[in-house]
Image (spheres, helix red, strand yellow):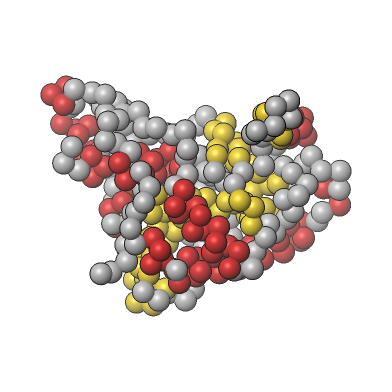
Amino acid sequence: MPLPLIGVVGGSGLYELPGLTGVRRERLATPFGEPSGEYLLGSLGDQPLAFLPRHGPGHRFTPSEVNYRANLHGFKQLGAARVLSFSAVGSMREEIAPGHLVLADQFIDRTFARPKSFFGGGIVAHVAFADPVCPQLRRHALAAARAAGATAHDGGTYLCIEGPQFSTRAESELYRSWTVEAAGRSGTRRQLIDVIGMTAMPEAKLAREAELCYATVALATDYDCWHDGHEAVTVAQVIAILKKNVATAREVVRQVALTAGELAERTCSCGHALDHAVMTAPDAIPPAARERVALLLGKR
């Protein structure tokens, strides 16, 4: 039985995925416009993959300009059941050093200029999002990251800002000041935000609406602007970290593909996110709205 297709979203610096066999490129049209570029399809071993650089060829789209809806819908059109996303981030914690990976399990969305749902325009749906990352895919990606030799942190909160500007020092210190009570330790507080980036939202929300398993591999390039020694870091050093992270990301994808048999069966609930989510009465949904989300709703 062939393994299901895995979609891979490349972040800053990750524009190609070498090592694929049986390579072909496919440009798709979606009800939500054009994706960021052509999808690169091929296989690593027995695992079929579809790769898309989030920012387009040559990094042409800002985080706000990326057509996240078209990108995720395109993966769905290709038959993907899972999407593994890579994202360059700033570290908000001393122990998450540049070059480290974080397998985030929570997000805070501070974006404001991006469409965040496939629904609307005559059809309303509310999906559960308390746990925004697929636990099965995240655990698999964590194991792959460690097999790739990376220092990978298990869990963390990714704060997504609008950008394209980075944070002010005041903003960075504000985000670092947010704390929550540590689990099982009454009165003990822990820092809430682990990394800061610009691309996980609304990507994760749309993946849930599309019933795609989704996980983010956040690759730290710097310490944002809160760190006392940040000014001593040169652009050349950040670029060197970015290049190292790209090589690590490619090895993570390879490790995911090598052990993809463990993902053959979906043990999560991601594939049922829409089962009770549509609130609009069937006879009240305009035909155009139903057609727009027909692939997502299936026979519902």
Question: Where's residue 190, x and y in %?
Answer: 71, 34
Whether residue 152 is visible, yes or no, is yes
Q: Is residue 270 left or right of residue 112?
A: left
Quadrant showing the N terminus: bottom left
- Look at 77% across and 60% down and name the residue there: 237
- List x then y, in percent, for residue 260: 41, 66
**Residue 271 placed where, x, y %?**
32, 45
Work out whether 196 lies above or below 22: above
Residue 65 seen in render: no
Q: Which residue is drawn at 68% across and 57% down?
A: 100
Marker count (numbered) = 0
User: Between 190 and 209, which is closer to the camera in this rendering?
Assistant: 190
x and y, in percent, of residue 144 in the image: 54, 64
Q: Is residue 156 left or right of residue 80?
A: right
Please state if 202 lies on the left or on the right of 12 as rendered. Answer: left
Residue 121 vertical placement versus 4 (above, below): above
Q: Look at 56% across and 53% down and name the residue there.
A: 217
